[in-house]
Amino acid sequence: MNHAPHVLLWTDSTAPYLDALAAAGLSGRVAVDTLPRKEQPSAEQRARTEVLMAFGAPPGLLATMPNLRWAQSMTAGVEGWLALPDLPADLLLTCARGTHRASMPENIVGALFYVAKPYAAAVENQKLARWVPSVARPLSGSTLGILGLGAIGQDVARIAATLGMRVIGTRRRPAPVDHVAEVLPPERTDEVLAQSDFLLLLLPATPETDRFIDAKRLAAMKPGAWLLNFGRGHLIDDTALIAAVETGRIAGAVLDVFRQEPLPADHPFWRTRGIIVLPHIGGPHPQRDQVVADLFTDNLARYLDGRPLREVVDRAAGY
């Protein structure tokens, strides 16, 4: 390139990104604007920005950015971007896929321990100075089903196998995966449901996965199983899940993602015994900005050199 492209860093935490650009020797090759998330780009910024790094964009904004060529999402999910009516057809869109790997597998395994072991009950009994012996359910020998065997799913499978769990799951393009006994196509999801003592949802948000876990699939789950959703909130039919838990069809659910966040105070999930609400804690971790900054910096170097970028969004697939 014969010019210094204008880059807009639309985030509250700019220091890790500016430091990463400097460390990579890119500061002199680009012109950088920074903008807090609560503010909107000025007319001058919109006119000159060629590269945008942001969590998302409000409808109508991208249409006012004539020189925008590439947008780097700071999140792995891009359903908000893809829903924009003014998303240019020729805009290169990349996501932050894989940047949750430092924390999400641990949080998922933590959820498995939480529902299998009597720690929560022991804490409540301690408040009453009440000694109530109980037997912990072993994870070893149980089956973990993972819908969505991407990078996070494979990390979870590795840890689960170490704990003695049998792991099965689905993948869009079935192929052998280390530590996974069976890898099936999405069309055979019901086979995973029927076998799993714990069912983990890690599917992306696409039109095909909207309410993927509905009343029919909940009925196909192994009786007494636990459902864990660390993927996207819209994967579940909320009403059907509440019914399945309240009737005892499944033991319960751990939910880290929701259709609306924060979860409204009047949502019945808060009051349904057996449903555990987590405030979207699965992915964030103290070093995540640095991880995203490293990805963005690498992609920016590739962009400047005319090389293929990493984590390009497949719009047809929805992720």
Image (cartoon, rainbow, N blue to C red):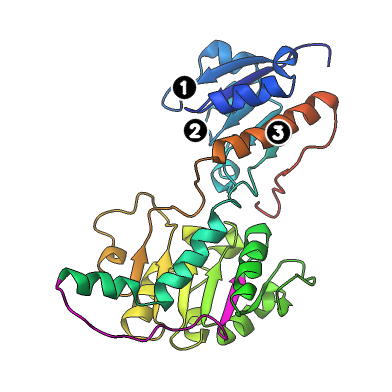
Dot 1, crowdedness within 10 Å: few (<14), some or many (≥20)?
A: some
Instruction: State the residue in front, 272 or 132.
Output: 132
Q: Residue at x 52, y 80 (%)?
A: 139
Q: Residue at coordinates 72% horizontally, 66% vertically from top-left?
A: 172
For the record, the magenta segment spans: 128-146
Dot 2 and dot 1 residues touching (CB under 8 Å): yes
Amino acid on which the number 2 mark rests in the picture:
Pro
Question: How busy is the neighbourhood of tag 2: few (under 14 within 10 Å), some, or many (20 plus)?
Answer: few
Upstream in sequence: badge 3 or badge 2: 2
Distance of label 3 from label 2 (alpha carbons): 16 Å
Q: Which residue is mark 1?
A: 40
Quadrant of residue 305 within the rendered picture:
top right
Residue in the image at 73% along x and 28% along y: 300
Q: Secondary structure at mark 1?
A: loop
Residue underneath mark 2: 58
Q: How many angstroms separate mark 2 from mark 1 (CA)?
A: 9 Å
Quadrant location of the N terminus?
top right
Is the residue marked by circle 3 packed among few (<14), some (14-19), or many (20+) residues within 10 Å? few
User: Mark 2 or 1 closer to N-term?
Assistant: 1
**Position above or below: 48 against 255:** above
Label 2: state its secondary structure. Answer: loop
